[in-house]
Image (cartoon, grey):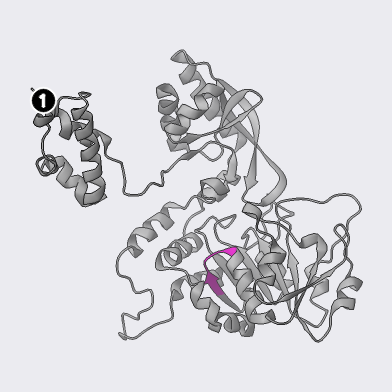
Amino acid sequence: MDRRRDVPRTDAVLADPRLVEAVAVLGRATVKGVVAGAQERARRGEIPPDRVADAAVAALPRRATTLAPVINATGVVLHTNLGRAALSAAAVAALGAAAGHTDVEFDLETGNRARRGRGTLEALAAAVPAAEAVHVVNNGAAALVLAATALAAGREIVVSRGELIEIGDGFRLPDLLQSTGARLREVGTTNRTSLRDYELAIRPETAFVLKVHPSNFVVRGFTSAVPTAELANLGVPVVVDIGSGLLVPEPLLPDEPDATTALRDGAALVTASGDKLLGGPQAGLLLGRAGIVERLRRHSLARALRVDKLTLAALEATLRGPQTPTWLALHADPGELRARAHRLSDRLCAHGITAEAVETASVVGGGGAPEVELPSWGVALDPVLAKPLRARSVVGRVERGRLLLDLRCVPPDRDDDVYNAVREA
């Protein structure tokens, strides 16, 4: 007898209450595809026909997205490939509140249209009182593109050769700026630029002077650069791209520029990212003089770079809420990390797994503070565990012939998850 005739029909399997519930969460097409896979296994004789529904339930994805949450044990606080900043619980809750219909552009009292994201803009303005006005776009590069397009299309941007950086995935600042219709007037050399270089370059075609923080590299030795306070006396606007998103000085990162200081030093406009040291969602922050920010806000390109309600909600909660996971990871106490590493390694050793608590160094990442090392602790394991651990959503780093799980970016309440993942792996 052909066993394939005993394989239940698709509609019969989909009637299983467990799969009916899954359809409501994952969608009919996804669940139907999983059922088809289970039916095929039954036709090949891998499972009995009466186990098709059970096999389908076991094979269901956990969520409707292919994006999988991971535990960041790499020691890189802002790991670009892992989504940079982890959102705070307040920001996550804000995302849930904003998921449905919201008053993002509506005044509940008057019933009229209101300024989009006004609460977020108020929170950002309160966080940087030195800014006369603020605006938000969809990422840091977009903030700079909007500024160049609105202020310098058909005109010149004066910039130091030492600041014509390349950012991630091969994108280069000169290409980005020239795509807006602006012309670049390069001054100085790779390692030294003086105030006189800028003075000689200023002419009627100059739209603004651009100062870019070279956040992902450091030039040492015979070098010089001109601070914002001196550039502000040149008679043209100064736009400062600080990159990493610090709104105020951070003692832990004394060489990392911040928006407040740049504005107080005379910058007409500061651009920054929201998903780096600020610890929020991906966003581009524009802070500066009221007239300039309003000009950018009213430019037609601003509509194409507009952020959605989820970004607005998460950004406002980041600004108003408690310390972010990024801040907590940066300021993690090495003594506490050491104790956690020893507890974790002892538990693993007790189950016959070779593990050792080791001292290591974490980094900021995300194109920020390239030479800063943060004292840290982690657990060293056999490197053959790297792949099976990744399959269990724990990502470490392999160095010097060992797999290192750095605990700086692992929340303390996830230590048990790391322990269980290692045991399973």
- Pick whichever, 418 or 141, lies toward us: 141
**Can you say which quadrant of the picture contains the C terminus?**
top left
Looking at this view, name the residue that lies furthest to the front: 1
Image point (57%, 75%), residue name = 134
Taking the magenta stretch, the answer to whether it contains residue 58 is: no
Task: Give x and y (percent) for residue 277.
Answer: 60, 55
Name which residue type carries label 1. Asp
Query: Above or below — where is 112 with respect to 162?
Result: below
Image point (21%, 31%), residue name = 55
**Left or right: where 106 falls relative to 323:** left
- Pick whichever, 168 or 250, lies toward us: 168
**Magenta extent:** 135-140
Judged from the image, the secondary structure of the residue bearing numbered disc 1 is loop
> Is residue 116 shown to the viewer in this render?
yes
Q: Quadrant of residue 125?
A: bottom right
Task: Give x and y (percent) for residue 82.
Answer: 52, 46
Query: Above or below — where is 24 with respect to 122?
Result: above
Task: Give x and y (percent) for residue 86.
Answer: 49, 50
- Pick whichever, 276 or 403, lies toward us: 403
> Is residue 129 shown to the viewer in this render?
no
**Can you say which quadrant of the picture contains the N terminus?**
top left
Query: Above or below — where is 321 with respect to 54?
Result: below
**Left or right: where 218 falls relative to 85:** right
**Residue bearing the label numbered 1:** 2
Taking the magenta stretch, the answer to whether it contains residue 136 is: yes
Task: Give x and y (percent) for residue 140.
Answer: 59, 64
**Left or right: where 321 falls relative to 81:** left
- Pick whichever, 397 or 339, lies toward us: 397
